[in-house]
Image (tube, helix red, strand yellow):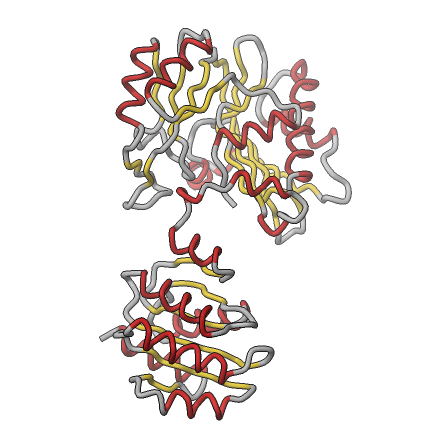
């Protein structure tokens, strides 16, 4: 679950990590007043979208007066910001963060991520702050240090010392750096983060370590422990189809392919996507309708798939365990008739009441194509969309 920079900094502040003074604004006049309030000769106006690389796309601008800040906001608010992470469609800027300036002495890169391979938390640091870390890792991997921290033991003083020396900092900074890193690690664990990235982490002329930017991804599987995560959700930043699916209780993730997939069960959904890929086509989505798929849920799922303009064909792959195949078949037929389906649909139903389901499909009067197995269904839909 992505959150905005201003929300990330609220979380950091909650855990005792200092950030620069800032004010969230939704209009140019609010930006003008924010400049007056912050009492800083220089402010930075930052577009608040769920994407990195905002500076290169024109989403981060420096202002030296209230009028200049307002002028920047007039152009920035409502613009479509395109970065390497947004894709060519970009994201609309609906709010900006006005932040005080700072006298920067040095810039560093710092992040914490879940290292699943080693069952650990990876602390990644570099003295190349402000740069795109992907480019640094390709061209100068020696400038990046990764430390694997086992959660059972946690962050230790020797980790901090290693980071300090790698960043080329004097040992007089050990106390301040130690405090920052321990607070960051504590926030990462307590807030169930998947990623915490600070780029850059600055050392000011007054020798303070301050996160100038912060990107946090929260693990939404832990939302039952953190109900306030719901307050961080910005549906305007999410894919509209994913929002619609979430509200309908469907597990849906949009992808870039052209085969719409409707499957029950996450494991079967991933196997279906892999098999489609094996036959030379690409899945347009991950969609798990769950174990209680009825006609209404199936119709909603159909509508979501059809709303994706890239979809050229649909593959329905249901294994009847908890959910009965005939119930799904009934939902598929009803939904197809209600929608007036025109795209080719391959249906593979196996398991509980599969024979009854087959009869419903055959007698529907609809032009469904039957898949006799996962491989057969995937092959048929792949051949159709490749024509």
In the rendering, at what x and y percent does residue 161 appear?
69, 26
| Position above or below: 264 against 320 | above
Residue 82 horizontal/vertical position (percent): 30, 38
The furthest residue to the right: 153
Residue at horizontal 31%, vertical 36%? 81
- Nearer-the-camera pick, 66 or 258: 66
Outermost residue toward the left?
Answer: 387
The relative height of residue 20 versus residue 322 in the rendered view (above or below) is: above
Location of the C terminus (image quadrant): bottom left
From the viewer's side, name the closer residue of 387 and 309. 309
Query: Looking at the image, which is closer to me, 111 or 187?
Result: 187
Residue 343 drawn at (x, y percent): 27, 74
Q: Is residue 116 left or right of residue 70?
A: right
| Residue 226 placement (x, y as % from top left) | 65, 43
**Left or right of 203 on screen, residue 184:** right
Q: Nearest the camera: 335 or 186? A: 335
Is residue 259 positioned above or below 99 on the image? below
Q: Residue at x 49, y 67 (%)?
A: 288
Q: Residue at x 49, y 93 (%)?
A: 355
Q: Is residue 240 above or below residue 91?
A: below
Task: Count the numbered circles shown.
Answer: 0
């Amino acid at each position: 679950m992505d959150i905005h920079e201003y929300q990330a900094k609220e979380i950091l502040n909650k855990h005792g990590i200092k950030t620069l003074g800032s004010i969230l604004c939704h209009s140019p006049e609010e930006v003008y007043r924010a400049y007056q309030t912050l009492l800083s000769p220089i402010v930075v106006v930052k577009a608040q979208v769920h994407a990195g690389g905002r500076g290169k796309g024109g989403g981060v601008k420096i202002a030296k007066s209230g009028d200049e800040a307002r002028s920047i906001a007039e152009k920035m608010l409502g613009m479509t910001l395109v970065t390497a992470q947004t894709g060519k469609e970009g994201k609309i800027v609906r709010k900006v963060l006005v932040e005080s300036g700072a006298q920067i002495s040095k810039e560093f890169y710092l992040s914490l991520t879940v290292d699943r391979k080693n069952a650990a938390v990876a602390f990644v640091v570099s003295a190349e702050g402000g740069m795109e870390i992907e480019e640094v890792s390709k061209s100068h991997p020696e400038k990046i240090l990764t430390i694997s921290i086992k959660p059972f033991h946690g962050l230790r003083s020797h980790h901090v010392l290693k980071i300090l020396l790698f960043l080329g900092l004097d040992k007089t900074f050990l106390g301040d750096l130690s405090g920052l890193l321990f607070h960051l690690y504590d926030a990462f664990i307590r807030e169930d983060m998947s990623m915490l990235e600070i780029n850059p982490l600055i050392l000011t002329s007054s020798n303070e370590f301050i996160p100038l930017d912060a990107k946090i991804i929260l693990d939404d599987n832990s939302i039952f422990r953190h109900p306030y995560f719901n307050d961080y959700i910005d549906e305007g930043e999410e894919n509209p189809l994913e929002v619609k699916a979430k509200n309908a209780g469907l597990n849906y993730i949009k992808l870039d392919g052209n085969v719409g997939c409707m499957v029950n069960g996450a494991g079967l959904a991933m196997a279906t996507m892999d098999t489609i890929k094996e036959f030379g086509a690409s899945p347009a989505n991950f969609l798990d309708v769950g174990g209680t798929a009825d006609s209404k849920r199936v119709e909603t799922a159909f509508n979501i798939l059809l709303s994706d303009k890239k979809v050229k064909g649909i593959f329905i792959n249901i294994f009847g365990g908890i959910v009965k195949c005939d119930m799904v078949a009934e939902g598929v037929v009803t939904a197809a008739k209600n929608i007036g389906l025109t795209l080719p649909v391959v249906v593979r139903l196996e398991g509980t009441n599969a024979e009854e389901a087959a009869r419903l499909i055959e007698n529907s009067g609809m032009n469904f194509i039957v898949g006799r197995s996962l491989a057969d269904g995937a092959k048929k839909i792949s051949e159709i969309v490749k024509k």
